[in-house]
Amino acid sequence: MDILIETENLGKSYGDVKAVDHLSIRVAQGEIYAFLGLNGAGKTTTIRMLLGMIKPTAGYARVFQTVVRIGSQEPWKSVGYMVEDPHAYPELTVYENLEVARRYHPGTPTKAVGQIIERLGLEAYANRRAGVLSHGNAQRLGLAKALIHDPKLLILDEPANGLDPAGIVEIRKMLLELTRQYGGTVFMASHILAEVSRLADRIGILHNGELLQELDASQLEKNRRRRLIVQVRDVDAAQQTLQAMDLAGEVNEDGMIILNHTPSLEQPEEINRRLVDAGIPPTQLWIDEEDLEHYFLRLVGKDGGMQNE
Amino acid sequence: MNNLSDMIWIEVRKAIRSRMPIWTSLGSLFMPLGIALILLIAKNPEISKKLGLISAKADLMAYTATDWSSYLVLYAEIIAVGGFFFFILAISWVFGREFVDGTLKDLLAVPVQRISIVLAKFIVVIVWCLAMAALILIFGLVVGSLIQLPGGSLSVILNGCFVAGATVCLVIAVVLPFAFFASVGRGYMLPIALSVLTVITANLMMALGWAEIFPWAVPMLHAQGASTMMPMSYWIVLFTSLAGMLVTYLWWKYADQNR
């Protein structure tokens, strides 16, 4: 499978500050690769380096097997992009802004403007000045500009930003359609974990400019912490019973026993049976799965993961 | 240089739809309107008596523009100074707006040579400035005819227009480097502030007797037909203009665009 984006030890420093450091990633054709990170993690700097807007201070980036060079007109023919907030010429209408975008991509047919307006649901706003559009519609216009020349690779920075739930679903469908039906490739940066987990095939987690982890979307599920929570009337007696099984847990401030051991997670019914046999039947017993936000924060060291709340 | 015509189309569209050319042209007409009013006051003693200080100024200006020849020199001088500021507005807007509106990033990763994008902007600025200058000059010719200035032979008028036209070209040439300041300053403020500083410096250079080697003073010297002018002065203007366009292009091509 062709590698459309490749970075090798890519880095960007501003004085002593390393915005991006030793970033090596590969994005294959047909993939949706999501870059996940907090604000200031280095997502936009990476995207700007991929698009030749800023020079790396270390390493290199290749897009369509072409080394990206600042100011070059290659390899942008089949690349669509949207960096940070979408901007448009405020005095031009939606139609005119798209006509401008079309002319920046020589060879794009005139009819592409009408088609992309229809595809993005912008018909009602076609003759409206871009300066008066709502944030959501401005975002649609930004996406329309990125898609007008039917690119094979889309590089998007926070594509769902400012969209209402229906808009988010629509964009998700469109990006999935682009990759699944047309073999397109998407590289997107986002800080919205739930969105990324629904859409991406692979996820790169970026923090303080470094790639902390790269994983498949399915791995994301597996890596989330799980714990068994047991609520009983006599905590001390229950702890003694569990200790006898070598499974003593922590007790949180609400008096619930938290068990992280693999046997208790794999066979919670056995815990239940032993407690019932000991005359301490649990009033509640359930497996709690770490939510995506906690998982992410734990990974970037901003949170201890699941707290015993 | 590919797609230059498309890039020019884009720049023309942006300029026209913004209405900036109309507003700057209307604004620039205040200069000849002012001259027309002053000449009218000077020619009507009845109005002149009632206006006191303005009357004294009007008399002074009327004294300097007693015939077509001196009137057109006055026009060339006005273009050299007043036109300079309006041309600065045009170039600041064309280059600075991409930064102010946040649209620059949409021009950077496209399959069009950067030189086509930058050159289209320069072409639109030049045409815009020439149109403004033509409007000012045509207005001046109409006013001159209406107030029936003496000495209006065809050769005098053509010569005056030629001097004014050459002054316009020199002003446009020295305005073009301000595209660099609009780009580096990422907006309108730096070129406008520097244009004021440039005019002050040009006056200082005139006082020191070095005006002929200071490119931004050369248009005024040319308009006045100063004897200190030398061929080198025009070469300095040309070099300044080309160097300004070159550094603007290099900046657009190679500078980090992280905003």
Image (tube, coloured by chain):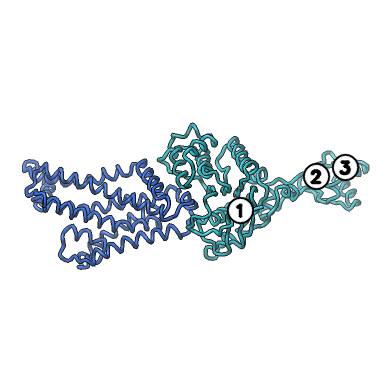
Label of residue A4 in the image:
1
Q: CA distance from mark 1 to mark 2?
A: 46 Å
Q: CA distance from mark 2 to mark 3?
A: 12 Å
Note the chain letter of the cyan one. Answer: A
The residue carrying pointer 3 sits among few (fewer than 14), some (14 to 19) or many (20 or more) residues within 10 Å by Cα, namely few
The residue carrying pointer 2 sits among few (fewer than 14), some (14 to 19) or many (20 or more) residues within 10 Å by Cα, namely many
Q: Is residue B75 left or right of residue B47?
A: right
| Amino acid found under the numbered disc labelled 2 | Ile
Marked residue nearer the N-terminal end (2 or 3): 2
Residue identified by numbered label 3: A269
Q: Is residue A161 left or right of residue B84?
A: right
Q: Residue at x 7, y 42 (%)?
A: B44
* Residue A95, image quadrant: top left
Which chain's residue wears label 3?
A
| Amino acid found under the numbered disc labelled 3 | Glu
Residue identified by numbered label 2: A229
Which chain's residue wears label 1?
A
